[in-house]
């Protein structure tokens, strides 16, 4: 079973974490750096110099030859440019390994080819990366060798953010400031910082690499664009939490070890609903670290798969007809003196601070449902949200029986006097212990569910960064907190004012609470009656970023400027158009060069057989004739649909306006793609498997 590893020993072994810093930095420098990390104090160059030196020595001991500023541009994946530590050779041809404080805190990638949405003209190509010292540096080992990775934020020459991390850090500042005001009002004067905690659960698919390489659609787009359903799908529900197959198990083991070395606390793993689908969840961490770690999780899942002859698919919908993949973003707020603001305690009805926080969140989510929805929009996620799967595209909040009851009491009488309790779980089996039951059952269909002491935002796509959703959560809740603090800081009767605010918010925003089945058609109708937005596609979600409401919110809390928001709109429309364009061109390529030739091949075989049988005897050839007729008819349908797709894809490329182009891709190109898929999937069912040019769904998801 391979070597025995000691998790305690390897955990964080490749991270320049607190222990490493304490061991390697002079006391004074360590203290200064901690101040920067914990209180956001500026780091002076002198301190940075010493830290850089220690970090370099440490990294070299780990085998590092290069360093990189590791950042997260608007492409959704991380970017890096590697520099080696070597200095210019001296006159004897000798080099030394160098790394200065300046190189640690600031990088200058020529960034003209990253998406900027018009924020930066190409003649002003300068971009800067700046060290986010609150997320520790690490050494990553792969085929290139070992590299010291320094988590950074990425900005333009004029200071506009060009990445996911800068707004995230700004939103963490905003929620910290407003949440501190709030907890102080409730007498918690010991807290000096409030931090959002995030635990993202990551879903993914694993397929055999050799088969993956035979599918151009998977290679170019990350999802299958053709493919008939296999005889068995996920209907038996025998994969979910099923025992993990040997090949996958050894893959997961290595993923865990790699992640542990990087200080990522990979904790939970299991099979998911769809065949070949799995999930990995780490223990939650401070938001910006959790975001970085989620990027490392995605990278590691992909990288380790290669070593096992497997390929990891992070796309939201790799296979039509089986469940897609998402990411559950668990979120809570914790003070540095250990109070989780989302912890209701056993009797939430008399936990006034909790009720105020909760109703503030209801208000925030109701007011900015469009922004939350937008934060989960990506091209792949359009196949899930609003498409009869995963959470619906309508934002609502699940509170559960206990809290719903408390809120109802508040609305009807202005006071909550009791909290329903869970009681004992009675199994009817004497030998099983009586378990204390949670006061609330789980709900799997809500996009935003309260789960005990945190909210779980379940709309996020599996391939997307979780930065965006957390920027929204932090900022909208900061706004709600700031509004109550503005009132409460001035009031003479604090208790009464709190009471009134809780009641008012619970009443005004009760429409966002929904505890029923979020997948049902009834809910779509009900939500419409309640006036909740149902934004069905990414293209329709994007404008939420630049409403007056959004601009006011983000400018007030200094998270985005108007120009940054406008640039993001541009980037998103473009991302959409580009992705669909690649999908369409891939379909055209596959249909023209692989599928049509194979089908012609098949018709030739059939025709030859008909003639041969005819010549040989007087046997019944009706089966072959029927098959040939059917195949030929579908072949001609394929050709017609292909011609249409070629036309509209051409037409799309000529549209100049980003928004119009994205809409055209959705309304015309995607429709033409669906039309081409229909005859091809039928053909797959009747053409000889030997002649079909690529592995089937069955081959891909059942034979890993
Ligand atoms: P569930 O099964 O209810 O979704 P898990 O215990 O599996 O809960 O946790 C799911 C994710 O939520 C994990 O990443 C976990 O670390 C994270 N999590 C747990 N508590 C919190 C919290 N207070 N704040 C943020 N994330 C949390
Ligand atoms: Mg969960």
Image: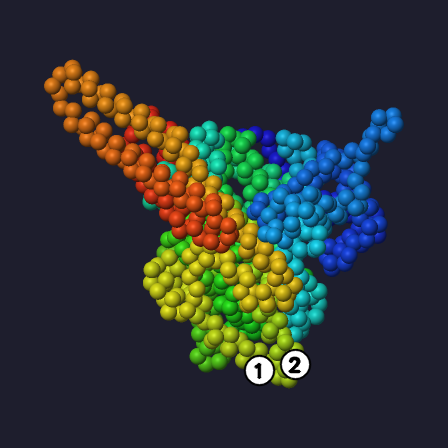
Q: Quadrant of residue 355?
A: bottom right
What is the crowding at mark 1: few (fewer than 14 residues within 10 Å), some, or many (at least 20)?
few
Q: Nearer the viewer, mark 2 or mark 1?
A: 2
Q: Is residue 81 visible?
A: yes
Look at 49% across and 32% down and name the residue there: 310
Query: Quick one: 588 or 458, which is closer to the camera?
Result: 588
Look at 65% across and 31% down and name the residue there: 144
Residue furthest bottom as drawn: 492
- Locate residue 567, reporting x and y percent: 59, 55
Query: Quick one: 650 or 260, which is closer to the camera?
Result: 650
514 on left or right of 166: left
The residue to which callout 1 is attached is 496
The residue to which callout 2 is attached is 490
- Locate residue 632, reporting x and y percent: 26, 31
Query: Quick one: 496 or 371, which is closer to the camera?
Result: 371
Asked if disc 1 is less than 8 Å from ligand 1, the answer is no
289 on left or right of 62: left
Asked if disc 2 is less than 8 Å from ligand 1, the answer is no
Look at 52% across and 48% down and name the residue there: 575
Look at 42% across and 34% down and name the residue there: 589
What is the crowding at mark 2: few (fewer than 14 residues within 10 Å), some, or many (at least 20)?
few
Image quadrant occupied by the C terminus = top left
Image quadrant occupied by the N terminus = top right
- Locate residue 8, reporting x and y percent: 65, 42
Q: Quadrant of residue 483?
A: bottom right
């Amino acid at each position: 079973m391979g070597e025995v590893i000691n998790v305690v020993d390897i955990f964080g072994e490749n991270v320049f974490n607190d222990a490493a810093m304490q061991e390697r930095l002079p006391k004074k420098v360590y203290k200064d750096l901690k101040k920067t990390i914990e209180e956001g104090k500026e780091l002076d160059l002198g301190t940075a110099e010493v830290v850089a030196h220690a970090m370099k020595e440490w990294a070299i001991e780990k085998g590092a030859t290069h360093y990189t500023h590791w950042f997260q541009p608007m492409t959704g994946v991380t970017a890096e440019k590697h520099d080696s530590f070597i200095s210019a050779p001296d006159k004897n041809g000798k080099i030394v390994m160098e790394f200065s404080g300046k190189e640690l805190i600031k990088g200058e990638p020529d960034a003209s080819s990253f998406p900027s949405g018009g924020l930066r003209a190409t003649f002003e190509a300068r971009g800067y990366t700046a060290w986010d010292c609150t997320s520790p540096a690490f050494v990553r080992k792969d085929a290139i060798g070992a590299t010291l990775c320094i988590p950074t934020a990425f900005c333009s020459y004029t200071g506009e953010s060009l990445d996911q991390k800068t707004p995230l850090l700004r939103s963490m500042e905003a929620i910290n400031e407003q949440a501190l005001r709030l907890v102080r009002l409730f007498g918690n004067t010991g807290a000096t910082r409030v931090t959002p905690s995030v635990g993202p659960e990551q879903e993914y698919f694993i397929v055999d690499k050799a088969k993956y390489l035979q599918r151009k659609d998977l290679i170019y787009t990350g999802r299958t664009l053709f493919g008939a359903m296999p005889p068995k799908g996920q209907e038996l529900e025998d994969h979910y939490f099923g025992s993990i197959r040997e090949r996958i198990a050894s893959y997961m083991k290595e993923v865990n070890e790699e992640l542990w070395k990087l200080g990522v606390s990979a904790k939970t793993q299991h099979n998911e609903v769809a065949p070949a689908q799995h999930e990995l969840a780490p223990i939650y961490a401070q938001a910006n670290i959790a975001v970085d770690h989620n990027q490392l999780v995605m990278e590691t899942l992909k990288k380790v798969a290669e070593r096992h002859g497997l390929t990891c698919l992070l796309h939201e919908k790799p296979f039509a007809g089986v469940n897609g993949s998402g990411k559950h973003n668990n979120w809570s707020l914790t003070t540095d003196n250990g109070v989780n603001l989302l912890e209701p305690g056993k009797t939430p009805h008399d936990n006034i601070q909790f009720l105020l926080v909760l109703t503030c969140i209801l208000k925030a989510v109701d007011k900015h449902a469009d922004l939350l929805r937008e934060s989960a929009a990506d091209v792949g996620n359009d196949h899930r949200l609003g498409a009869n799967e995963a959470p619906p595209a309508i934002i609502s909040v699940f509170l559960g029986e206990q809290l719903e009851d408390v809120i109802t009491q508040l609305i009807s009488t202005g006071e909550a006097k009791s909290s329903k309790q869970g009681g004992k779980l009675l199994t009817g089996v004497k030998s099983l212990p009586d378990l204390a039951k949670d006061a609330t059952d789980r709900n799997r269909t809500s996009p935003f569910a309260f789960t005990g002491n945190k909210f779980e935002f379940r709309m996020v796509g599996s391939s997307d960064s979780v930065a965006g959703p957390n920027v929204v959560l932090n900022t909208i809740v900061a706004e709600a907190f700031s509004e109550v603090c503005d009132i409460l800081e001035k009031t003479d009767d604090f208790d009464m004012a709190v009471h009134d605010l809780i009641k008012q918010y619970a009443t005004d925003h009760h429409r966002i609470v929904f505890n029923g089945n979020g997948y049902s058609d009834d809910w779509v109708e009900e939500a419409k009656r309640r006036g909740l937005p149902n934004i069905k596609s990414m293209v329709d979600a994007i404008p939420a970023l630049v409403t007056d409401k959004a601009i006011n919110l983000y400018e007030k809390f200094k998270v985005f400027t108007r120009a940054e928001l406008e640039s993001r709109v541009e980037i998103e429309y473009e991302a959409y158009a580009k992705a669909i364009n690649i999908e369409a061109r891939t379909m055209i390529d596959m249909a023209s060069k692989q599928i049509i030739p194979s089908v012609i091949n098949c018709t030739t075989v059939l025709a030859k057989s008909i003639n041969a049988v005819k010549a040989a005897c007087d046997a019944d050839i009706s089966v072959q004739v029927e098959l040939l007729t059917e195949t030929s008819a579908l072949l001609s349908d394929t050709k017609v649909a292909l011609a249409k797709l070629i036309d509209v894809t051409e037409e799309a490329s000529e549209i100049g306006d980003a928004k119009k182009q994205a809409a055209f891709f959705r309304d015309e190109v995607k429709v033409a793609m669906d039309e081409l898929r229909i005859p091809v999937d039928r053909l797959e069912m009747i053409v000889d498997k030997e002649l079909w040019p690529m592995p089937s769904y069955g081959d891909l998801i059942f034979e890993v």
